[in-house]
Amino acid sequence: MKFKNIQYAALIPARKNSKRIRGKNTISINSKPLITYTLDAAVKSKKIGLVIVSSDDEKILPLTKKYKNLIFIKRPKNLCLDNSSTETAMLHAIKFLERKKFNLINLVLLQATSPFRDAKDIDNAINIFEKRKLNSLVSVNKRKIFLWKKIQNKLSPITYNFNNRKITQKMREYYLENGAIFISSIKKFKKVKSRLFNKIGFYEMEYLNSLELDDKKDLNYIRLISKII
């Protein structure tokens, strides 16, 4: 049997038990389960040849049935622990599909907690990945921020000198990972077992598209934005 070459496969990891928000991946956002926002974006992408959902949550499987070119992988319990890394889910999915005679070239990691990242974002990120001949890529959001860190019971500035406070226009810009898109060359990923490596590029996203559901404080805000975006 010949291997089926897939230039870009999207992986959506969706572990069942989230400590911060119960049932996070299927929680309702504007009458839609959270994960379906990412499923819709992946399927609508012009660059993605295969969508993979890796989960131990039986509630997610029915949500994937209506999509074409999608494979649901039942993730084993030992890879769904609180200390299990996303990279272990990536490796498991790659090995599973290799046994099914798929030859995956690049993996596009799409976390379900970024509901406003759309198909255009995915395709634009892949275009940058190709144009710059990158090994890996991360999506970011550009910000000018007054950032502090806590040391014992005191705060210390990280991104500026409070004795020489600059106007916003003259502040240094910082790029924050937004968790929406990661692209990895699979051949190299299998060696280093890290999603970012070697020649790393970035794709800059708009603020609203970068919004991420991380804890309960984000939930009401994201539900509000979902009604107007």
Image (cartoon, rainbow, N blue to C red):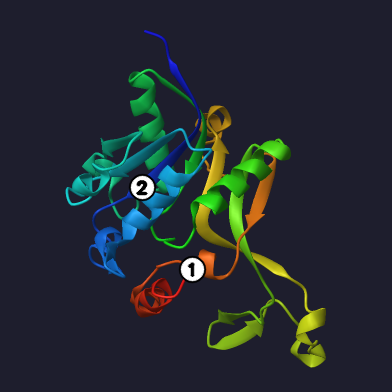
Q: Which residue is mark 1?
A: 211
Res. 19 visible in picture: no
What number of labels is visible?
2
Which of the numbered marks, if any, corresponds to residue 58? none
Q: Callout 1: helix, strand or loop?
A: loop
Q: Residues within 10 Å of mark 1 (few under 14, many from 20)?
A: many
Residue 122 is left or right of residue 36, and the answer is right
Tell me if label 1 and label 2 are in contact, CB under 8 Å: no
Res. 14 visible in picture: yes
- Return the residue nearer the eye: 147 or 130: 130
> Residue flagged by tag 1: what amino acid is it?
Leu
Q: How many angstroms separate mark 1 from mark 2 (CA)?
A: 18 Å
> Residue flagged by tag 2: what amino acid is it?
Pro
Q: Quadrant of the N terminus?
A: top left
Q: Callout 2: helix, strand or loop?
A: strand
Q: Which residue is mark 2?
A: 13
- Indicate the position of residue 178 as horizontal and vertical percent values: 54, 62
Q: Who comes first in sequence, dot 1 or dot 2?
A: 2
Q: Residue at x 61, y 48 (%)?
A: 124
- Indicate the position of residue 29 as horizontal and vertical percent values: 31, 68
- Indicate the position of residue 103 as horizontal and vertical percent values: 46, 21
Q: Residue at x 56, y 53 (%)?
A: 121
Above-or-below relation of 31 to 147? above
Residue 196 is left or right of residue 111, and the answer is right
